[in-house]
């Protein structure tokens, strides 16, 4: 089973704080979905609520909320969590996730 890491940057919204701040109606099954992803192989993930959106960045969907993350051999690394407000994910959301992923990889998973 994979562990989970939530990346935080000074002055940027913290993914774990965002998730914990959701109202119960919005929170839904998000923790269960994250646990499922921690436990099972990517081949077993239901594509109706999780899919890869670009090089090693995955999108997990829960209602209007999105969790962008990537995988290492040890962790699911949560990069960015937000409320989706349009049909497609805005480029700014991917642009926030991408350097966080790259920084984590450069740091050697510290």
Image (cartoon, grey):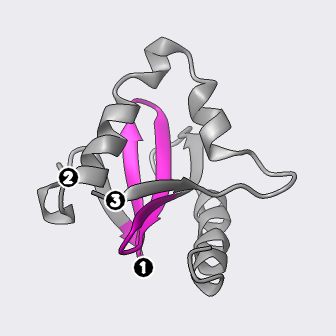
Spot occupied by residue 54 in the image (x, y as percentages of width and height): 42, 73
For the image, the number of numbered tags is 3
Q: Earlier in the sequence, mark 2 or mark 1?
A: 2
Image point (62%, 45%), residue name: 15
Which corner quadrant of the image does residue 95 belong to? bottom right
How far is the residue under mark 1 from the one under mark 3? 20 Å
Spot occupied by residue 47 in the image (x, y as percentages of width and height): 20, 52
In the rendering, which numbered label is found on residue 2? 3
Asked whether 23 or 5 is in front, the reply is: 5
Closest to the camera, between mark 1 and mark 3, is 3
Instruction: Tell me which segment is drawn in magenta.
Output: 53-77
Image point (40%, 30%), residue name: 63
Secondary structure at numbered mark 1: loop
Mark 1 surroundings within 10 Å by alpha-carbon count, few (fewer than 14), some (14 through 19), many (20 or more): few
Asked whether 36 or 66 is in front, the reply is: 36
Mark 2 surroundings within 10 Å by alpha-carbon count, few (fewer than 14), some (14 through 19), many (20 or more): few
Cβ atoms under marks 2 and 3 closer than 8 Å: no
Asked whether 70 or 59 is in front, the reply is: 70
């Amino acid at each position: 089973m994979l562990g989970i890491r939530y990346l935080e940057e000074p002055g940027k919204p913290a993914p774990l704080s965002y998730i914990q701040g959701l109202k119960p109606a919005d929170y839904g099954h998000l923790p269960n979905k994250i646990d499922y992803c921690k436990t099972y192989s990517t081949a077993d993930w239901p594509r109706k609520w999780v899919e890869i959106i670009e090089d090693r960045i995955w999108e997990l969907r829960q209602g209007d909320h999105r969790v962008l993350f990537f995988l290492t051999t040890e962790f699911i690394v949560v990069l960015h969590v937000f409320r989706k407000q349009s049909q497609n994910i805005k480029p700014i959301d991917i642009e926030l996730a991408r350097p966080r992923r790259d920084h984590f990889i450069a740091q050697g998973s510290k």
